[in-house]
Image: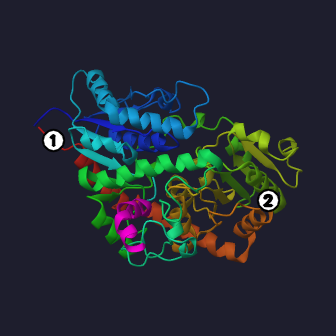
Amino acid sequence: MGSPPHVAVVAFPFSSHAAKLLMVARALATAAPSATFSFISTAASLARLPAAAPSNLRYVEAPSGGAFDEVGIPAWRRMELFVEAAEAGGLRQALEAARAAAGGAAVSCVVGDTFMSMAGDAGVPWVAVLTGGPCALLAQVSEDAIRKDMGDHVAPSRGDELLTSHPGLGMYRVRDLPFDMMHPVGGGGGGGGGGDGANMNRVITTIIRRVARRVPRYATAVALNAFPGLYPQDVSAALSDALPSALLIGPYHLLPGAAAPSPDDDDPHGCLAWLARRGAGTVAYVCFGTVAALPPDELRELASGLEASGAPFLWSLPEAAWPLLPPGFLKATDDDDSSRPRLVVPWAPQGAVLRHQAVGAFVTHSGWGSVVEGMAGGVPMACRPFFGDQMMNARDVARLWCFGTAFDGDTPMTRDGVAAAVVALLKGEEGARMRARARELQTRTREAFGPDGGSVNNFRKFVDIVCADRA
């Protein structure tokens, strides 16, 4: 027997990636109390996270590459600077810092976000953790074959063509792909419009292409934020063929030990108390994550559509966007006599909100974390995708699992479209079918974490791989 394992959990310090990796790290540390776990991210990222806990899990700072040193650096450029620094030796420097903090115990395994694919060259086994949609990674791994089949640049008129020639991807359209085949690389795309949107697409595409090359070649195993049986058999088989030792252990936020240690402190804006005054299934929850930014005109259309729906709504919206809302929008009071109560906050405890009985609809960018949290909460969704995996995720919601609708990712939302979608999800006959389907998926999610559940069994295998004696 060798020394107890020292596992470095390496997070990508943007969007919700670090929070998802911390869930996995907590669950691992709870399941393997004799092992040491070092959670590695930038100082700015770690400052936004709750206490590490349990006691065998510690935070270790990674070099930022100057990504957070200057005010006003756009998000895409911060990502680019950080990844460049990590590729140039920053990750190895962080692993050395983890060794020193652990009293000289060498790192025996890296559990790394797939976006940190340079971990494949760390000199120890790399167990990858995917935070995005599994089928988007499958498409990315298949990119060369898709381009050989269709050509590098296809006419926009072929955007609705189904990818039936590619295993596991037959239900997706060309325009759902996480890489753009209808424009030159770096052109087109959403994410806020203008140069920032195009640059974000370019940076994300570069990162994911590295992921697609490295994961099949270097990862010992890949954890997926989904549960066994979620996908049809052909998709599951394609994922198994394309990814080494793919283990469906999600949703990550339901893993034993994954929850934050102080949940009572995680609702600073009183969202749950506000929801407690609403009737069951009456509230629309609105959140577009921390990276996707609606163009100003579309933001105002969304706000007007929420008002026009007549439904109570809780909107998690960064404060920087509040001045873009329609005049007087934020002045409307929230009291029990209001016919259209609303609560707009800079941050909401999304998992808890989506589990609340008052929430009956979720308007979202369809990031994968939001999709699985909506599924676990049994909440039907209206998806407005922007970039990356979001188009495929929205397609899954609307066409594969049928518990929501999807706005066209190339067409901005309108006031009438938003109002119609919210009313349909909360009250309509079609919405009733989606609500029933959402509840079915919620039940299947719970079963995955029941006795002998699929995610529970796969997580045991995951722990064994991560903590294997490699002496």
The 10 Å Cα crowd at callout 2, few under 14, some 14 to 19, many 20 or more, is many
Residues marked 1 and 2 touching at CB (< 8 Å): no
- In the image, is 334 to the left or to the right of 2? right
Q: Which mark is residue 469?
A: 1
Q: Is residue 345 visible?
A: yes
Q: Quadrant of the C terminus?
A: top left
Secondary structure of the residue carrying tag 2 is helix
Question: In the image shown, does 164 or 340 lie closer to the viewer?
Answer: 164
Residue 450, can we see it? no
Q: Is residue 456 left or right of residue 259?
A: left
Report the amino acid beneath label 2: Gly
Residue 110 in the image, given as x and y percentages of width and height: 28, 40
Give the colour scheme shown.
Answer: rainbow
**Camera-side residue: 242 or 412?**
412
Q: Which of the two discs, 1 and 2, sits closer to the camera?
A: 2
Residue that badge 2 annotates: 305
| Residue drawn 12% across the image and 35% down it | 2
Residue 183 is a magenta residue: no
Percent coordinates x, y for residue 344 in the rendering: 75, 44
* Whole-number angstrom distance, CA of label 1 to CA of label 2: 57 Å
Residue 130 higher or lower than 119, as above or below: below
Q: Which portion, as a residue range, is magenta? A: 134-150
Quarter containing the N terminus: top left
Type of amino acid at the residue the image marks with label 1: Asp
Q: Which of disc 2 and disc 1 is earlier in sequence?
A: 2
